[in-house]
Amino acid sequence: MSNRPRPLYVPDLSRPAGADVDAFGEVGCIACGQRVSVMDADVVGLGYRCARCSMLATPDDDIAASLAPSQQPPLRALPRRGSVAIAGLVLFAIAALCWRAGWDIELHDADGGESVVIWIVFAAIACVGIATRPRD
């Protein structure tokens, strides 16, 4: 084992191309490319966005706007609320059927036995909680 510190990682801190203001005080919208006054534009991660594109933007657009294009493909969109809620309801149904049928697996560890059905109920509650949580 060596006592050398890990090498310092310094990200690219150069100014993004979308943040340049021209001689007339105008900037290009990173979403549509339209030239607007810098006073009428909203600041986003890699530059500016016009008022029209800002009104149409979703939280997912704001996340992608702060990343370089090379970093955007690995970014996955959040699942829709409905699909997470449906998954929670399906898990509740599975837990109810398992409980009603008397099917269960006891997990034994140092603390004693635990029921798998309880963990399915916890997962269902988590799904419903995620689906009803406000998104920023």
Image (cartoon, helix red, strand yellow):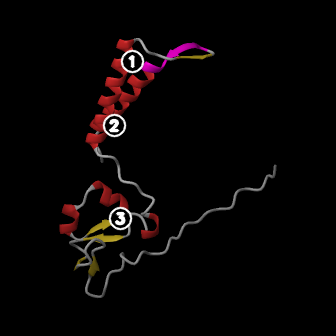
Is there any visible trace of residue 129 in the rendered image?
no
Which residue type does callout 2 highlight?
Answer: Ile
User: Label 3: few (<14), some or many (≥20) within 10 Å?
Assistant: some
Whether the magenta-drawn stretch holds residue 114 is answered as yes
Quadrant location of residue 90? top left
Closer to viewer: mark 1 or mark 2: 1
Closer to viewer: mark 3 or mark 1: 1
- Identify whether 11 is placed above or below 24: above
* Residue denoted by label 1: 98
> Where residue 39 sits: x, y (%)?
23, 73
Mark 2 secondary-structure assignment:
helix
| Badge 3 vs badge 1, beta-carbon distance below 8 Å | no
Q: Which mark is residue 65?
A: 3
Q: Which mark is residue 12?
A: none
User: Label 1: few (<14), some or many (≥20) within 10 Å?
Assistant: some
- Identify whether 20 is placed above or below 79: below
Q: What segment carries the magenta color?
A: 111-117
